Amino acid sequence: MKTFSALRVIYMLLTTYSYSMDPDIPRQWYEQELREAVIHADIPFILESINRDSNYIYSRDSEGNTLLHWAAYNGHKDVAELLIHHGAFSDAHNKQNEIPLHCAAANGHTSLLALLSNNGTLINCQDSNQYTPLHWAAMNAHMQTAQFLLAHGADCSSLDYRSLTPLHWAARNGNKEIAKLLLAYGAESNAQDKDKATPLHLAAHNGQIGVLKVLFKNGAHIDALDSNKATPLHWAAYNGYSKAL
């Protein structure tokens, strides 16, 4: 059985008997209910709300997230299509400078990527940490998302605020298949971050044996030195990963 919050019941009763919103109920209450409707893909409620006041489509929460951010975060393609049809902006930024495409990529919602990428123009958009959607896909092991992004022009050499590439993140987190994919698209196996650490350093630091093997096969330098003059083997030994030695 479908359930509704108390406020949404009040909203439905008010809008049943009056075209205008009750001025005694703060607007942000209605906006919160609309966000909940987006999160739960309650399309009838969403339509009712924006048909009565089209400005609701531009409402934001305290973190600057739009309704489209929430649809993307939760993977609701039909809701996202509805919001865009009614004027939602796919390039809207929240306080972390994330656009809805970042939210979809970070959570592996591949079906929304074409809709949110604005014909590819937003594929390499960076948030406040300079993460691109591909960074998010690589760090969270979303293979299909990474495949889509790379096939549509994502830059596998893009750098975040620490000069980490998507391959650094795949190596750090042990995402072997994504590491293979990135290398197939030309990712540099010996790219250095701000501490001169390569993907091999990060894989060794975290004992990611599978990724180490992939990187070795793709020309990663075992004797590369980071800013502390440490090699990947030093990091593996320091952290007790004997199988990496």
Image (cartoon, rainbow, N blue to C red):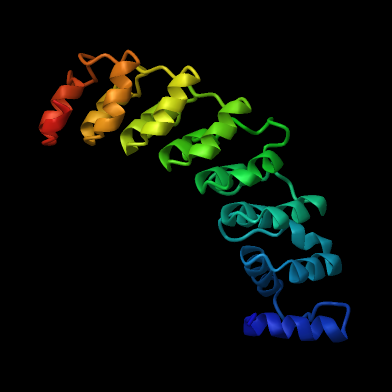
The spot of residue 174 in percent (x, y) is 32, 36
Which picture quadrant has residue 49? bottom right
Q: Residue at x 48, y 41 (%)?
A: 142
Q: Is residue 135 above or below residue 92?
A: above
| Image side of residue 2 versus residue 89, left or right | left
The spot of residue 193 in percent (x, y) is 35, 24
Q: Residue at x 43, y 41 (%)?
A: 141
Is residue 132 something that shows in the picture? no
**The N terminus lies in which quarter of the figure?**
bottom right
For the residue pair 217 and 65, the one nearer the viewer reads as: 217
For the residue pair 150 and 160, the one nearer the viewer reads as: 150
The spot of residue 234 in percent (x, y) is 14, 24
Is residue 11 something that shows in the picture? yes
For the residue pair 163 and 212, the one nearer the viewer reads as: 212
| Image side of residue 222 versus residue 122, left or right | left
Q: Residue at x 31, y 17 (%)?
A: 217
